Amino acid sequence: AQSVTQLDSHVSVSEGTPVLLRCNYSSSYSPSLFWYVQHPNKGLQLLLKYTSAATLVKGINGFEAEFKKSETSFHLTKPSAHMSDAAEYFCVVSEGGNTGGFKTIFGAGTRLFVKA
Amino acid sequence: DTAVSQTPKYLVTQMGNDKSIKCEQNLGHDTMYWYKQDSKKFLKIMFSYNNKELIINETVPNRFSPKSPDKAHLNLHINSLELGDSAVYFCASSLSLPDGRETQYFGPGTRLLVL
């Protein structure tokens, strides 16, 4: 059975400092992993995705995530936080099948606060 | 050239009414989904359609019914609306790949408020 756990419900950083949002997953098969961001009163936006290629995945807005199979983790990082990064971040695990249609599980979300 | 679009963006209605939310994707994807995001920001998958066949149907009230006139559209009909239906509803689409992997692309969401 697949599941995803975001270890922090809230993270607060100062502008210009590194960001780390933690995510652990469990999956019966080789999953696809994603990070989405949701700004207040906005829709979901895909930040990056891992689909069995390079384990270090680079996304938009300077974010990146590293897939570590041994640790079943997919933590999201950014070297230097910007005020515009303040948002809700969702870690997502997805398993597919040959007939199409996929089970996609969202984490509970991590709210990122950025202080000036 | 929006990839996944939803209408309306906002919907305010009275309890007991029947309403529909429309979703369209122009990505050529073969699977579409509806998600509900509650006030605590949890996203729950409600339905998915692959080639007009319902393949995932989470435990949702039968007042909710998805309707897919073609591969590019998946509309959500809600009958006898209740206060607890107030939420943001997201449509998404994906393309099945031979190795089973996929990425879901989301619409902007429809904020439903039931009074």
Image (tube, rainbow, N blue to C red):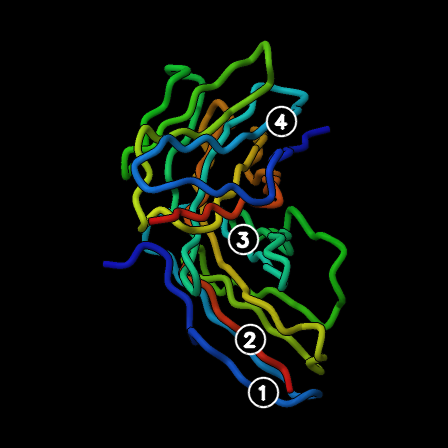
Residue farthest top in this picture: A70
Q: Secondary structure at mark 2?
A: strand
Residues indicated by labels 2 and 3 sit on the same polypeptide chain: yes
Is residue B67 shown above or below B105?
below
Q: Which residue is mark 1?
A: B13
Q: Which residue is mark 3?
A: B33
Q: Amino acid at mark 2?
A: Leu
Question: What is the CA distance from the residue labelled 4 to the residue labelled 2?
Answer: 31 Å
Is residue B86 shown above or below A7?
below
Question: What is the CA distance from the residue labelled 2 to the residue labelled 1?
Answer: 8 Å
Q: Which residue is mark 2?
A: B112
Q: Amino acid at mark 4?
A: Tyr
Residue nearest the viewer, comparing B17 with A40: A40
Q: Quadrant of residue A28?
A: top right
Q: Amino acid at mark 3?
A: Tyr
Q: Position of residue B97 (x, y in %)?
A: 44, 30
Q: Position of residue A9 (x, y in %)?
A: 60, 44
Q: Is the Cβ of the residue at disc 2 closer than 8 Å to that at disc 1?
A: yes
Residues indicated by labels 3 and 1 sit on the same polypeptide chain: yes
Q: Which residue is mark 4?
A: A25
